[in-house]
Amino acid sequence: HWTLLSVSLLNSLLSTACSVGLALAIALTIRSRGMRLVMGCNSSALPADARAAIVTNDCPFNTTRIYDTALALWFPSMVLAAAEAVLSGRCCLVALILQGIGPCARSSIREQV
């Protein structure tokens, strides 16, 4: 039970941090219209919008779809990380119930679990 409690608490904290980090990355990317994604390209020929960026010799990757692809991957990842944090929190609550710790120490709830 203690292992369940410690692992679920750690996973809940890491999932929450991941979810917040992804939300911050999404916000910064949308705010800069994708230019933060192409900062590694040292070309002054890049347009102000990353969606209209073309492949240049100064950029080590194809910039044509990086904005849409990053957002298409980050949104579901953020949702899944948030769901994982919630489920880990519930596992932590179950571990507390099984240990009889805190407000979850009532025996009727413990017997139901």
Image (spheres, helix red, strand yellow):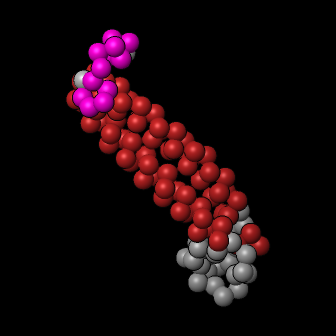
Residue at image location 73% in from the left, 75% down from the top = 49
Residue at image location 50% in from the left, 44% down from the top = 81
Q: Which of 64 and 111 is in front in this view?
A: 111
Q: In this view, does 51 lie to the left or right of 22?
A: right
Picture quarter containing residue 79?
top right
Is residue 104 one of those drawn in magenta? yes
Residue at image location 68% in from the left, 72% down from the top = 33
Q: Please indicate, yes or no, whether residue 35 appears anywhere in the rendered image.
A: yes
Across and down, in percent, residue 89 comes to: 40, 36
Q: What's the magenta bit mostly, secondary-structure-wise?
A: helix
Q: Nearer the viewer, residue 30 or 43?
A: 30
Across and down, in percent, residue 50 comes to: 70, 72
Q: In this view, does 43 lie to the left or right of 3?
A: right
Across and down, in percent, residue 65 comes to: 71, 62
Residue at image location 67% in from the left, 64% down from the top = 67
Rendered view: 11 above or below 101: below
Rendered view: 91 above or below 31: above
Tell me where the magenta segment starts and ends, as one range.
Answer: 101-112
Picture quarter containing residue 23?
bottom right
Is residue 46 one of those drawn in magenta? no
- Image quadrant containing the N terminus: top left
Number of numbered callouts drawn: 0
- Image quadrant containing the C terminus: top left
Rendered view: 32 above or below 24: below
Across and down, in percent, residue 91 comes to: 38, 29
Q: Nearer the viewer, residue 65 or 56?
A: 65
Picture quarter containing residue 100?
top left
Q: Which residue is most to the right?
A: 52
